[in-house]
Amino acid sequence: MVIVIFLLIMIILGLGTYLFFMKQELKKITQSIYEMKCSDSNLLIHQSISSKELNVLILEVNQLYQEMKKKEIFFGQQNKSLRKMMMNISHDLRTPLTSALGYIDIVLNSNLSKEEKEKELKIIEERLKRLEELISSFFDFSQIIFKRDSIPKQEENLIALLEEAIAHSYEDYQREKRQILFHRETTKIKIYSSHKLIIRIFDNLIGNALKHGKGSLEIIVDQRKKTQIIFQNKLKTDHLAVDRIFEEFYTEDISRTKGSTGLGLAIAKEFMEQLGGKIWAKKEGDYLKIILEFPFDEKK
């Protein structure tokens, strides 16, 4: 009987000691959580006593904290990008608008000949078309960011879509005394995709080459392994960060010199990914190659 009482006392003392240390450990964990919440440090909670249950709790809290930190960093970067975007939008919209208003003032308040007025009005028209293009790009990009609806698809001929996009820019290239050279070995490649998005991708790439390239633009259809479309043109500048050209509002070197928003390639990339395809770029000498890889989605 004495032995039983002794064992019970020892068990009670053991449990009391365990509960005491457990209470102290919980206080430390609570203090650590408070410090994590109030500071910008990346310190995690560490366990002082061996306990499977506490170990699971600490692991979950640490993982939750790390996820919160990642989101905090992500949203901080997004906020920074948003501020930069607003500054770029303000600058890009103001430039053609201010220019157009200046020419309007000249037409209204100067004694110009009919020929001179027509020349000034032509410039005003070009500035307003540029403004329209910018607004359209911003609208498209906002749709990409805030709207993620399913994309209607149908059977399309990829070659015909390329020919349609080339026709859109044919006169622009002619005015610059440049050419679009289209290399393909077939007249039909069937894919199940979105006519509207693919045309916009091609238009953006062809327009980008016109603004920032020189000489002829070569469009090559490569079907040796997968269906790839290669847009190849000579660059005007050697200072192109190829790994950044698909970033929203990339403004180094090529973008600001022509008043571009830098959205064209960002939109093309987003649309390609929405269609299940791939897009990447590489620089070979003074040539830029942008490669598109299309999936063959079957109609369901």
Image (cartoon, helix red, strand yellow):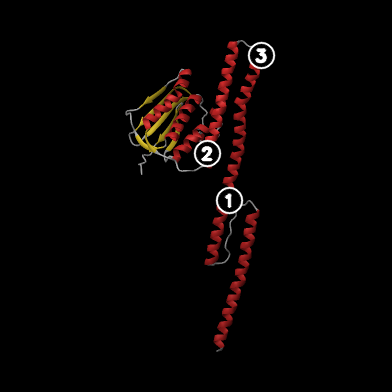
Amino acid on which disc 1 is placed = Lys
In the depicted structure, whether residue 113 falls above or below residue 266: above
> Is residue 176 placed above or below 260 in the rendered structure?
above
Q: Which residue does the image show at 56% across and 56% down from the upper left?
A: 64
Seen at 52% across and 66% down, the residue is 52
What amino acid does circle 3 point to?
Answer: Ser
User: Is 101 left, or right, of 284 in this rendering?
Assistant: right
Q: Is residue 165 visible?
A: yes
Q: Nearer the viewer, residue 181 or 109?
A: 109
- Badge 3 density bin: few <14, some 14–19, many ≥20, Cα 10 Å: few
Mark in the foreground, 2 or 1 = 2
Q: Which residue is mark 2?
A: 143
Cα distance between the residues tagged 1 and 3:
61 Å
Give the camera-side residue of 103 and 269.
103
Which quarter of the picture shows residue 38? bottom right
Identify the mark nearer the N-term, 2 or 1: 1
Q: Is residue 221 left or right of residue 255?
A: left
Separation of marks 2 and 3 at Cα, in angstroms:
43 Å
Comes first in the chain, label 2 or label 3:
3
Residue at 57% x, 85% y: name it.
5
Percent across and percent down for residue 217 are 43, 24
Numbered disc 2: secondary structure: helix
Residue under the point 48% across and 30% down:
204
Residues at marks 1 and 3 touching, judged by CB atoms closer than 8 Å: no
Residue 90's spot in the image, x, y percent?
62, 32
Residue holding disc 3: 110
* Residue labelled with disc 1: 69
